[in-house]
Structures are given as C-alpha cells and as structure tokens.
Image: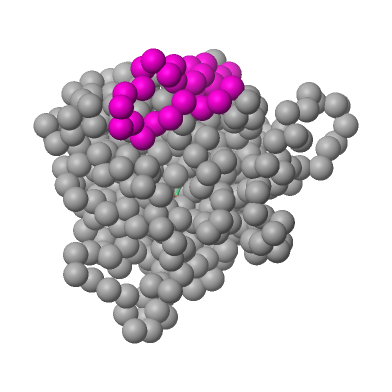
Amino acid sequence: MAKMATSMVESGDDAFRKIFKFYRRRNPPPDFSKVIDFSKGVPSDKIVPAKLDAASVSDVEAAKVGLQPVRSWRAFGLQGYPGFIFISNPFLVGSQSFWVRQCLKTYPQKPNVCNLDMHMSSSDTQDIWGKSVHGLSLPPSGKKEPKTLLERLRWVTLGYHYNWDTKTYSANHHSAFPADLHSLSLHITAACGFPGFNAEAGILNYYRSDSSLGIHVDESEIDHSRPLLSFSFGQSAIFLLGGICRQDPPTAMYMHSGDMMVMSGQSRLLYHAVPRIVPAPHGHAAVEMEGRSQAASLQDGTVVELVSEEDWAVCSRYLHSSRVNVTVRQVLGPGQSFPETPSSHQRTNASQTAGYHDGSADGESGKRRRISSYD
Ligand code: SIN
C-alpha cells in the first residue's frame, strides 16, 4: 500500500487516474475480472439489494413510459456508496427502441444545443438525422467514407443548456425540457424515493467504440439534494465510481444497454468517469436483439410510440458501434432561482477542478468537449 502511494506521488497520478488509465489501456488489454456486472446477479460482498418504493408508480404509468412494474426491477446498492442505486435494465422488452429513436432523431433537433453548433451554422445542424440517414443506410464500402453528422455528434443539451466554458446553467439559456423524458425521469426517481423530481436539464453523450469520458463531479446544479439520473443504450461501458477525493480508488462496473443509475445523497457528488466502451454481451446490445415494440403492446395515453422500420434500421446500425448516455438533472430546488451573477456558480475550489475530457488520454479535466476518442 505504502509502495503504491509512493508511486502515485512520483508519477503525479492519483488513485482514480491510475485506475482510469488502467481500464483505458489498449495494449495489452486490461484484466476485466474485477468489474462488477449487475446483469449477472453474481453475489459480491459489495452489492446490496436497494429498496424501492413500488407503490409510487402504478404498473400502468410505468408501462406508458416503457418500464416494467417497479416490483420487477432488479435494483442494487453498493457497500460504501450510500445513495447510489443501480437498476439493471428495467425497460419492457422492445421499448428501449423508442428512447433510442428520441436520442438520435428527436433530441438533437433545434432548439436543443449540440457540439456541432460550435463550428457549424444552424442551417447545417438543423436536420442532423435527415442529413445522416442516407450515409448510415449504405452498406460498408470498404473505403474510408466521410462521417455522417450523427456519427460526429458528441453531446446534446436539453432544458437549461449546460455551458461547457463557464460550467454553469443560466436562466437565459433555456428551452423546454422534453415532456416524455421528464415523465420517464419522474417515475424512476419516484421509485427510488424522490417524489416530485423536476427534470430541468439533460446532457446526452454519444460515444463511439474508442471514446472515453474524463474524471469529473456533476456539481454545477444549484440544488444538490435532488438525485442525478443516468441511463444508456447500445454498446456497454466501464463506469468508474470514486469518492469525494481523487485519492479514493474507484469501483468499476459495467453499464449495459437499458441500465440506469441514480446518484443521490452522499453519492450525488462523487467523482466518476467512463474510461472505456466495451462490446455489449454476446456482441449485441439488448436493444438490438429486442428490436421495436409491437403496436399491440402499446396502451392508450402511452408516451412510448412505435418506431418505424426505417427509423429502426438507422438506429440499430448506429448502435452497433456506439453508446448513448442520458443524464437528467434538477438544477433548482423548490423556490430557488439563479443568482444575479452566473459566474458566482463557477467552480472555485480545488475539488471543482475536476471536469470533462478534452482529448488527453489520461482522464484529466478539460473544457467544452466532454468525450474524447483516439482518432
Ligand atoms: C456515462 O456516460 O455513463 C456517464 C455520463 C456522465 O457522467 O455525465
């Protein structure tokens, strides 16, 4: 232990960064045997069952947003991480397809903001889906084709749009938060013991197979008493959950398609990162194997709609080599408003220097571009 501490100091690495670099390493590939896989139901002394409030969401309400009845969810906590809840794919078979279509076709549309807006005109980024469909439908030619806009998408912000430079939200940079995603978030957080969650900001991250997301804490929200909700589709990820300081070694876990995480209470402000995207189990994500919901299984007043065959062909092609993560946040507590000077909410102390990846390969913080790739 003493030897490890010394070597960290010598190389300038903290415990989190060291483990981030370990899992990001390509050659030789790391040993994944210590990565927790909640989908396998393998008993581990670190995994504890999480108690959910099954009465808070009726089976009908859950089904409308594409979720199984809450009593069927497989929810876990982790020893040493109070307030952290992992829910192993609670979606009804076939309903992930709707949420994937929203993430790829609907949410990147204006007035939402995306990374492509930073260097392209709004007319060029007006119809990312429409401009990508043809390219994504072509069979691989063997030649290096230019990437479609969808393949160049790295992030989209919803609701209060996160400002990557100032690391703040503000009252005057806002668009309506999608009602369907608000409804999904409300039900999940209610089942986890947080009734009345108000989904006010969302960040979608689009990962290619060689992408990673640097070590950071999500603390720009003004009220930290509300949980942070995260869910993903497509290829799997290694997710690292650390402590309140970078010297706390993180726990590694797989996040597969449909899995959800709720970070609340003492786990709301923990360091976390995604060092690596890994192929989904058996080579196919649950969402690819399940395909689309059948119209007959959809109820009246449902949020989840049937995805057309054409749209699904594009989505499944994209997901074959990609992962989409959605985080949903409540920014303001009841009765709170933004401060007069947004800059007063900028990161000011040492713990706030953690941030997002800007292209370095070792998990260090950076501005604006959250996801980095090898290319
Ligand atoms: C993830 O992609 O699983 C994490 C996203 C985040 O921390 O913002």
Residue found 19% across the figure and 50% down from its top: 196
Residue 374 seen in this snapshot: no
Q: Position of residue 249 (x, y in %)?
A: 39, 47
Q: Position of residue 232 (x, y in %)?
A: 45, 36
Assess whether residue 64 is covered by the magenta stretch.
no
Assess whether residue 303 is covered by the magenta stretch.
yes
- Along the viewing direction, whichever of 292 and 139 lies nearer the viewer: 292
Residue found 38% across the figure and 65% down from its top: 220
- Along the viewing direction, whichever of 315 and 360 lies nearer the viewer: 315
Picture quarter containing residue 49? top left
Task: State left or right for residue 215 relative to residue 230.
Answer: right
Residue found 43% across the figure and 66% down from its top: 174
Q: Is residue 49 above or below residue 111?
A: above
Q: Main secondary structure of the magenta part?
A: loop
Q: Position of residue 53 (x, y in %)?
A: 14, 34
Residue stretch rendered in magenta on the structure: 283-309
Q: Is residue 262 above or below residue 55?
A: below
Q: Position of residue 158 (x, y in %)?
A: 45, 55
Q: Is residue 347 above or below residue 302?
A: below
Residue found 59% across the figure and 22% down from its top: 309
Task: State left or right for residue 2 relative to residue 85.
Answer: right
